């Protein structure tokens, strides 16, 4: 193999679009103002740039610019939405409903809320990763103040039926929050149209810079408020104190503008490339399975299980060249399978053998061809070495084998 590097891990982070970088540069040295400095031109220039970016971002998701609260990223936005709603609406109730397949920023915030006296229901999902709407509705009770469902999953790309979820929440008068970090800028997202009241997203997942994100907070019908989690100067309508990251916000705005213009063509091109990658692998290799609903999936993502191959081991055969994610997160003591795939009902074997491919704006056709060759070679190589694969080929029913404890 040669020394080329292919980046197929765009769900972890995207490269910053060079057009975004160009837009940011003047705001480091030439325009150094603090957007909160109201008494001189440096401050005014910074504030104008922030206002402009706020509008670019609001336009992308069809909301008012006043409804955008800037944060340091989606992790902070998730924390602010969940803990902020819990504190603000505590008198109304203490119950929150979410899914087992949410991002850790949501799940860990919910864990903290439980320690603060909240009650959280973590719903199972269907085998295809989508929410079970009947279960969701059944979980709502008089003390429920918030439902939190991610727009699109970071591991599988599965898109949730936000409109149906919004209808259920509206019917019962509970607020709806969505972590839309993987969806904004890649597919059309309009929170107001589907009844989402709070929505978290991040610049670095949509070709903007790292360390800047936003929380959409609905201002009218209903007027939603969150208790600030950061105390200080009362920036961002009192919901998030701290000097604004002006260059980052300018870049976020530019990224939003480009996304609005190029989303349709990007997603058409990427879904073809993604489909080609998936089809080639499934045609040329045995026992490859798609994880998550293929019909309701982000256009640039596929999560595949290569049965009887350890994802981590497989990655070692090509990760000098190809960047992907495996469905296992290395914890200190053991290799745990992805909790998202386990929640979909995958057994440990399939969860351990999964790889997430996430393409992006800069992925080329040639890179996909190259990745397919490397993957086919890697999987065949791993299986040749595997006694389990040999047993499978000999027709031994592996589920009936009683394995020795080790
Ligand atoms: C990346 C990601 C986050 C965290 O975003 P940061 O901006 O890196 O804090 C949260 N939720 C989802 C779904 C993500 O993909």
Image (spheres, grey):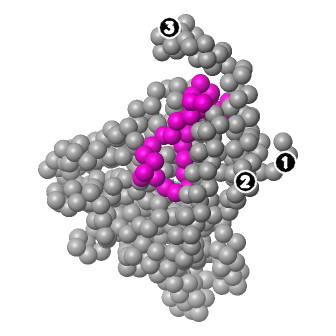
Contact, mark 1 vs mark 2 (Cβ under 8 Å):
no
> Can residue 37 be seen from the camera position used here?
no
* Image: 48 above or below 171: below
User: Disc 1 designates what residue?
Assistant: 3
User: Disc 3 designates what residue?
Assistant: 402
Q: SS of the residue at dot 3? A: loop
* Left or right for 250, reference 115: right
- Report the span colored magenta: 286-315
**Of labels 1 and 2, the one closer to you:** 2
Q: Quadrant of residue 309?
A: top right
* Left or right for 106, reference 332: left
Q: CA distance from mark 2 to mark 3?
A: 42 Å
Determine crowd level at label 1: few under 14, some 14-19, many 20+ residues with C-alpha closer than 10 A: few
* Image: 294 above or below 163: above
Q: CA distance from mark 3 to mark 1?
A: 43 Å
Identity of the residue furthest to the left in this view: 142
User: Disc 2 designates what residue?
Assistant: 367
Q: Position of residue 133 (x, y in %)?
A: 26, 48
Q: In the depicted view, which residue is nearer to us: 244 or 157? A: 157
Q: Position of residue 206 (x, y in %)?
A: 56, 64
**Of labels 2 and 3, the one closer to you:** 2
């Amino acid at each position: 193999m040669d020394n080329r590097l292919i980046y197929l891990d765009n769900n972890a982070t995207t490269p910053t679009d060079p057009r975004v970088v160009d837009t940011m540069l003047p705001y480091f040295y030439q325009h150094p103002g603090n957007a909160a400095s109201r008494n001189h031109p440096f401050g005014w220039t910074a504030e104008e740039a922030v206002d402009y970016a706020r509008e670019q971002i609001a336009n992308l998701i069809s909301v008012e610019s006043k409804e955008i609260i800037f944060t340091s990223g989606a992790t902070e936005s998730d924390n602010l939405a969940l803990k902020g709603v819990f504190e603000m609406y505590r008198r109304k109730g203490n119950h929150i409903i979410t899914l087992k397949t949410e991002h850790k920023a949501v799940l860990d915030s919910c864990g903290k809320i439980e320690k603060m006296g909240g009650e959280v229901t973590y719903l199972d999902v269907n085998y295809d990763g989508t929410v079970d709407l009947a279960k969701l509705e059944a979980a709502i009770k008089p003390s429920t103040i918030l439902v939190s469902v991610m727009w699109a999953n970071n591991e599988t790309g599965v898109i949730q039926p936000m409109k149906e979820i919004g209808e259920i929440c509206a019917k019962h008068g509970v607020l709806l929050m969505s972590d839309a970090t993987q969806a904004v800028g890649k597919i059309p997202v309009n929170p107001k149209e589907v009844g989402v009241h709070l929505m978290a997203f991040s610049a670095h997942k949509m070709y903007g810079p790292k360390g800047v994100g936003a929380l959409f907070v609905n201002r009218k019908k209903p007027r939603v408020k969150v208790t600030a989690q950061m105390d200080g100067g009362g920036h961002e309508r009192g919901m998030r104190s701290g000097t604004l990251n002006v260059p980052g916000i300018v870049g976020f705005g530019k990224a939003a503008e480009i996304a609005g213009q190029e989303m349709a063509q990007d997603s058409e091109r990427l879904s073809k490339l993604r489909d080609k990658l998936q089809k080639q692998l499934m045609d040329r290799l045995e026992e490859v399975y798609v994880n998550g609903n293929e019909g309701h999936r982000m256009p640039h993502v596929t999560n595949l299980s290569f049965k009887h191959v350890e994802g981590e081991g497989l990655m070692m055969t090509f990760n000098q060249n190809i960047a992907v994610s495996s469905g296992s997160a290395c914890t200190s003591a053991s290799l745990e399978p992805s909790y998202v795939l386990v929640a979909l009902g995958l057994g440990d074997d399939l969860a351990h053998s999964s790889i997430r491919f996430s393409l992006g704006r800069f992925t080329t056709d040639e890179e996909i061809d190259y990745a397919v060759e490397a993957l086919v070679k890697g999987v065949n190589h791993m299986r040749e070495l595997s006694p389990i694969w040999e047993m499978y080929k000999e027709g031994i029913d592996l589920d009936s084998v009683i394995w020795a404890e080790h």
